[in-house]
Image (cartoon, rainbow, N blue to C red):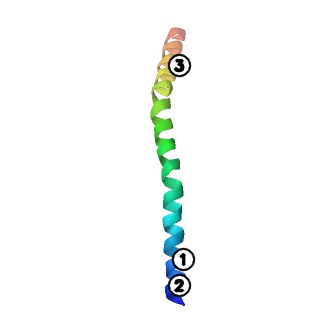
Amino acid sequence: MFGLLKSLTDLAGDMATVILAPVEVVIDLTGAAVKPFAEAAKDLAADVKSLKD
């Protein structure tokens, strides 16, 4: 009985890994693509603030 429960738990864990791995890759790629734009926005904001000073 407990062997079956352990097998089902292992199967659920493996399925979660298979399902979530592509999602994690997409999130990492999106983060890498957005990072330069975020840095440029910070630089632009700093430049605008320096104009006020």
Q: Which residue is mark 2?
A: 4
CA gap between label 2 and label 1 equals: 6 Å
Q: Is residue 34 above or below residue 44?
A: below
In the rendered structure, which amino acid carries the disc numbered 2? Leu
In the rendered structure, which amino acid carries the disc numbered 3? Ala
Q: Which residue is mark 1?
A: 8
Of labels 1 and 3, earlier in sequence is 1
Would you say the residues marked 3 and 2 are in contact, meaning their CB atoms lie under 8 Å apart?
no
- Crowd class of label 1 (few under 14; some 14 to 19; many from 20; radius 10 Å): few
Which residue sits at x=53%, y=19%?
45
Q: Residue furthest top?
A: 51
Q: Which residue is mark 3?
A: 45
Q: Nearer the viewer, mark 1 or mark 3?
A: 1
Q: Secondary structure at mark 1?
A: helix
Q: Percent from the top left, x then y, of residue 7?
A: 50, 79
CA gap between label 1 and label 3 equals: 53 Å
Q: Is residue 5 above or below residue 25?
A: below
Which residue sits at x=47%, y=19%?
43
Where's the N terminus, which quadrant?
bottom right
Would you say the residues marked 2 and 1 are in contact, meaning their CB atoms lie under 8 Å apart?
yes
Q: Percent from the top left, x then y, of residue 5?
A: 54, 82
Q: Secondary structure at mark 2?
A: helix
